[in-house]
């Protein structure tokens, strides 16, 4: 009798300990939202590991391997530039050189492609990484960002190819090029927040990937990438003003073509959009993460 009671008490204590561990492990973080957002930087090593793994798996068995992460977006940009600049013979102005239009298009396409790639892949990130979602100790914040490294690599290589061309054509880089790191930093903040937002929504709504692809396809032609804003009718100009990627393209062109990256409107508009998307995206993802293990 005594032995049976001892065993019962022992099992009860183990059960209570297990329930306590489960509660402590799953209870929500009570720190302020901004503190948790800053704390994501501690998971840089985990993000690097998942980004390298995805790059290897994406191009495994191909001849060029990881080089496709750079070649594919550059070919995309080159194809659009060739079609609009040399087939349609478009120009920024009747007397403007054609190569100026090509540079104008490339500086709009490079950031567009980088943001679009991360956003589209983030919509299915949680579903394609179910095993990590169910792993208690893995930082889920890095999962929607697994394609960020590849997109940034493509963007940086595209800029490195473009900078000598700009320097040769203009007799040197404009002074506004010093603002390029700040533009990149704002773009990363915007992209990370957008990936968190779409990663959370994509876990609950699987059709979001198709909606995002359609939105970006239409949005590319509502963004002054292949044309200047002044040719738009007045009815469509508010759409451009509300489009953060239109202001991002303006910042790149201002830094590398006109030497004026710090115009008030694009700086204020894209800076505010990046901040709102970053904090808002993290807040949505932080709220949704408690349900991810149950719905995936």
Image (cartoon, grey):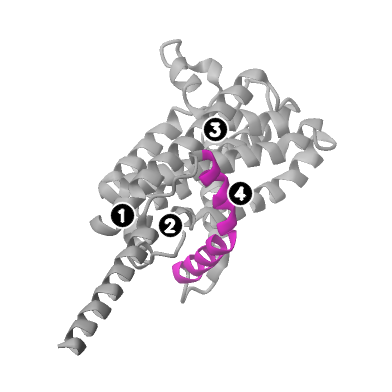
Instruction: Assign a secondary structure to mark 3.
Output: helix
Mark 1 to mark 3 CA distance (whole Å): 25 Å
- According to the image, label 3 marks what residue? 275
* Residue 140 numbered mark, or none: 2
Estimate the spatial distance between the alpha carbons at disc 4 and disc 2, rounded to whole Å.
25 Å
| Residue 196 visible in this rendered orientation of the protein | yes
Mark 2, secondary structure of its residue: helix
CA separation, marks 3 and 4? 21 Å
Q: Is residue 272 left or right of residue 126?
A: right
Q: Which badge, 1 or 4, comes first in the chain's sequence?
A: 4
Foreground tag (3 vs 4):
3
Q: Closest to the observer: 136 or 88?
A: 136
- Sequence-wise, which precedes: disc 4 or disc 2? 2
Labelled disc at residue 155 = 4
Q: What label sits on residue 292 in the rendered view? A: 1
Dominant secondary structure of the residues highlighted in magenta in the image: helix
Is the Cβ of the residue at disc 2 closer than 8 Å to that at disc 1? yes
Of labels 2 and 3, earlier in sequence is 2
The residue range painted magenta reads: 34-58
């Amino acid at each position: 009798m005594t032995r049976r009671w001892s065993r019962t008490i022992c099992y009860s204590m183990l059960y209570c300990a297990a329930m306590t561990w489960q509660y402590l492990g799953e209870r929500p973080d009570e720190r302020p939202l901004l503190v948790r957002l800053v704390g994501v930087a501690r998971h840089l090593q985990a993000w690097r590991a998942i980004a390298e793994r995805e790059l290897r798996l994406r191009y495994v068995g191909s001849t060029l391997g990881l080089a496709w992460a750079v070649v594919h977006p550059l070919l995309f940009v080159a194809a659009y530039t060739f079609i609009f600049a040399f087939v349609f013979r478009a120009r920024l102005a009747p007397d403007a050189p054609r190569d100026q239009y090509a540079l104008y298009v490339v500086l709009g396409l490079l950031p567009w492609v980088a943001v679009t790639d991360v956003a589209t892949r983030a919509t299915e990130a949680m579903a394609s990484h179910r095993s990590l979602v169910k792993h208690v100790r893995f930082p889920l914040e890095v999962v929607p960002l697994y394609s960020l490294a590849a997109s940034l690599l493509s963007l940086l290589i595209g800029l490195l190819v473009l900078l000598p061309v700009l320097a040769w054509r203009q007799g040197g880089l404009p002074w506004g090029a010093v603002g390029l790191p700040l533009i990149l930093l704002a773009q990363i903040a915007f992209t990370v927040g957008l990936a968190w937002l779409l990663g959370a929504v994509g876990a609950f709504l699987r059709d979001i990937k198709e909606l995002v692809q359609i939105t970006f396809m239409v949005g590319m032609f509502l963004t002054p990438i292949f044309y200047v804003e002044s040719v738009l009718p007045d009815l469509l100009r508010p759409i451009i003003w509300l489009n953060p990627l239109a202001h991002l393209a303006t910042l790149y062109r201002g830094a590398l073509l006109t030497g004026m990256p710090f115009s008030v409107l694009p700086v204020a508009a894209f800076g505010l959009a990046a901040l709102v998307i970053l904090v808002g995206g993290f807040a949505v993802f932080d709220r949704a993460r408690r349900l991810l293990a149950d719905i995936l």
